[in-house]
Amino acid sequence: MDRPALDLPSRLLLALAPWRNAAKWHIAFSGGLDSTVLLHLLAHLAKTQTLPALNAIHIHHGLQEAADAWPEHCQSVCDALGVPLQVVRVQVEPGASLERAARDARYGAFSDATQANEVLLTAQHRDDQAETLLFRLLRGAGVRGLSAMPRDRALGRGHLLRPLLDVTRAELEAYAQAHQLCWIEDPSNEDRQFSRNYLRHQVLPVITERWPQAVATMARSAAHLSDAQGLLDELAHIDLAHARTESEFDWLGVPSLELAALTELSAARQRNALSHWLAAYTRLPDSDHWSGWEDLRDATGDARPVWRLADGELHRAGGRIWWLSGRWLRTPPPAGNWADPSISFSLPDNGVLTLCGQTPDGPLHIRYREGGEVMHLPDRGHRDLKRLLNERGVPGFVRGRLPLLFRGEQLLAVANLRGLDGSVQDGWHLHWQPPGEDQGLS
């Protein structure tokens, strides 16, 4: 069935309808053809429609000399349209892919600028969607990657929206010419050493010459794959719900899953559930590097396997898998004397310690486990600390940073472990608040 014959402004309004109650619409404005058309459309619609406040954002990457003149051009366009402009200069980190580094810097700035109940509008169109699908196909992407660019997603505290994904590049060019718009021609867009430019200029023209509807059908395939990814996400939610059981060590604040609930699944469902769970914490490995999960999953019971990923590590302990990053991967420095136990003790790089109840006689100091520690228990006599930790099932990754309260060489308490954390008879116990950590990328 043919698409209804709506003009470009009407189609844009239809795409934006669910987002018209936003507090503000930011427009990612490079000054190029696509974003110039989007900005012009929105500025003119705002004259006859009740829209959120508009604000254009231009990102200056500083990668080429010609770009120094672009903020001035963008300012003149925005002044003519009556739209405020924000110019943000970013630092592009060096790396193997300049394209990716520039994109990361750009979207980092967009994320910072997008507040709650605000939307960032970008001008990617249907041809861009086809290029993305082809690019990711050649890189061996899975279903999520081949879904190409989503129409909307979370960004910063707000949302990112691509309202032109059903519009072709040719339609944008026709609109720009009809309204005599001026835009920037980025010289780097002609550089074939960049993969997307190569696909755009060398590959897609050959494909569309043979199959004129290729761009439309590729975009449709991306939409089908997006639906398939939605189903995989729903399945992951179901599987993860069974694995997110309570743990005796939830107070650590470390994300964890029950291993048995995962191993009952097929290998494909394990990878799907884990990918969904880990995506909030780390960049995921490609399909050739999932052997680390298999090694961790299949290790013998007394092993302490670790799967090292880009932004942290997955550990296995107590029948669970645990996600560790940041401070949890660093050995805390020595703690030292606790001069005034009536005041909470801030442990360097290891949270806060509080002594609750009647303060035991001192002087007191805090140490971490080194091996060979012995603790006297009223009903059991002297017991090796290692054995006591084994009895409690304390995960290996936390043992070296679990605060120990000493008086001289006498071990008085092990923080947070019931029966070891103080003296019921004397009315005190040792409470540890582990270090808070931003566990996620999202």
Image (cartoon, rainbow, N blue to C red):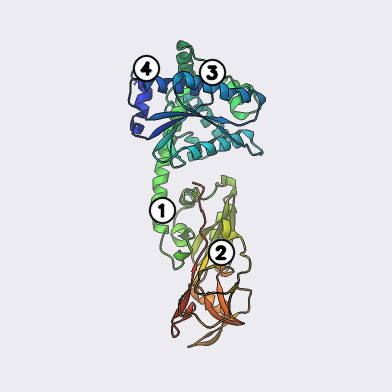
Rendered position, 306 above or below 181 = below
The amino acid at mark 4 is: Asp
The amino acid at mark 2 is: Asn
Residue under label 1: 239
Decide: marks 2, 4 in contact (CB < 8 A)? no
The residue at the point 34 percent across, 26 percent down is 14
Tell me the CA gap for discs 3 and 2: 53 Å
Q: Is 431 positioned to the left or the right of 13 in the image?
A: right
- Sequence-wise, the earlier of marks 3 and 1 is 3
Tell me the CA gap for discs 2 and 4: 60 Å
- Residue 171 at what x, y percent from top left? 45, 17
- Residue 441 at what x, y percent from top left? 52, 47
Question: In which quadrant of the rendered image does the N terminus lie?
Answer: top left
The amino acid at mark 1 is: Asp
- Residue 412 at what x, y percent from top left? 54, 81
Image quarter for residue 118? top left
Q: Nearer the viewer, mark 2 or mark 1?
A: 2
Residue 20 in sight in this render: yes
Q: Nearer the viewer, mark 3 or mark 4?
A: 3
Image quarter for residue 408? bottom right
Q: Which mark is residue 183?
A: 3
Residue under label 2: 350
* Crowd around label 1: few <14 · some 14–19 · many ≥20 (10 Å): many
Q: Is 3 positioned to the left or the right of 184 in the image?
A: left
The amino acid at mark 3 is: Trp
* Crowd around label 3: few <14 · some 14–19 · many ≥20 (10 Å): some
Residue under label 4: 7
